[in-house]
Each structure stands twice: as structure tokens, then as C-alpha cells.
Amino acid sequence: QVQLVESGGGLVQPGGSLRLSCVTSGFTLGDYAGGWFRQAPGKEREGVACISSNGGNTWYTDSVKGRFTISRDNAKNTVYLQMNSLKPEDTAVYYCATMPRSWCSRWYSEYLYWGQGTQVTVSS
């Protein structure tokens, strides 16, 4: 059974940091590209970052470049999102997703498996 379980969300003050984890099971993560997406209330789901199956290539949306880092540990079946210098506009539900190919994509419609999401709230 395929599962993606996110954790690490929470309430943080502006300028703070969080590290999201996405533990996967039921498939071989090393054969899958991974991505992190977010959805704020009333807004469309957007791509935040993605990483190729071997971790060699990454992509970030402009608003998080220099602040967020996506990484993966295929031996631990886990994809991470390190978020630094958080801003109130980063508040959203964050989802991890995977697709069965080596290169990743910013478009959520291309992803096959999804986690349930974890809430990130940036507020003073």
C-alpha cells in the first residue's frame, strides 16, 4: 500500500524555520521524482520545490529561492523541505508528492502519489 506521510508543520514566528519530512512506503522512492506543494485558503495549489529521483536536480518557485531547500534520502524513503526565514505569506497546507520518473515538475497534475498535508502557519 502506497503511503506518503508528512510531518514537521506547525506555528512559527516570522523569520523562523521549520523542516518538513515526507516518509514514503509501498514503492521504491529512488525511482520517483519528488515535489512539495502548498495551498493557502482560497488559492490554487502551487509548486514550491521539486527534486529529481537521484537528487541531482532541483527546482524552486521564485518566492522561496534562497530560503527553502529540498532534499531526499532514498535509503530512508524520505523527502525533506527545509524552510528558513519564513514569512506570513508562506502560511499554507504543505503537501509532498511523487511521480514515477527521474525528472521532476512544478505542475501538480503530473504527480501520482500524494500525502495528506501538514499545516504551516507563520504568525507573530
Image (cartoon, rainbow, N blue to C red):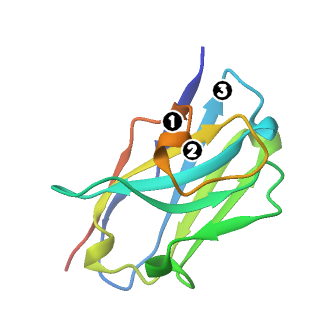
Q: In this view of the protein, can residue 44 be seen by the observer?
A: yes
Mark number, residue 22: 2
Which residue is farthest top? 1
Residue beneath disc 1? 5
Name above or below for residue 57 compared with residue 2: below
Residue drawn at point x = 58 percent, y = 52 percent: 35
Name above or below for residue 10 compared with residue 27: below
Instruction: Find residue 82 and report its horizontal and vertical position in percent.
Output: 56, 68
Mark number, residue 25: 3
Q: Could you tell which of marks 1 and 3 lies nearer the N-terminus?
A: 1
Instruction: Specify the quadrant that holds the C terminus.
Output: bottom left
Answer left or right for 108 relative to 53. left
User: In the picture, residue 65 is in which quadrant?
Assistant: bottom right
Q: In this view of the protein, can residue 120 be seen by the observer?
A: no
Q: Residues within 10 Å of mark 2 (few under 14, many from 20)?
A: many
Q: Amino acid at mark 1?
A: Val
Q: Quick one: 19 or 88, which is closer to the camera?
A: 88
Task: Determine the secondary structure under disc 3.
Answer: strand
Q: Amino acid at mark 2?
A: Cys
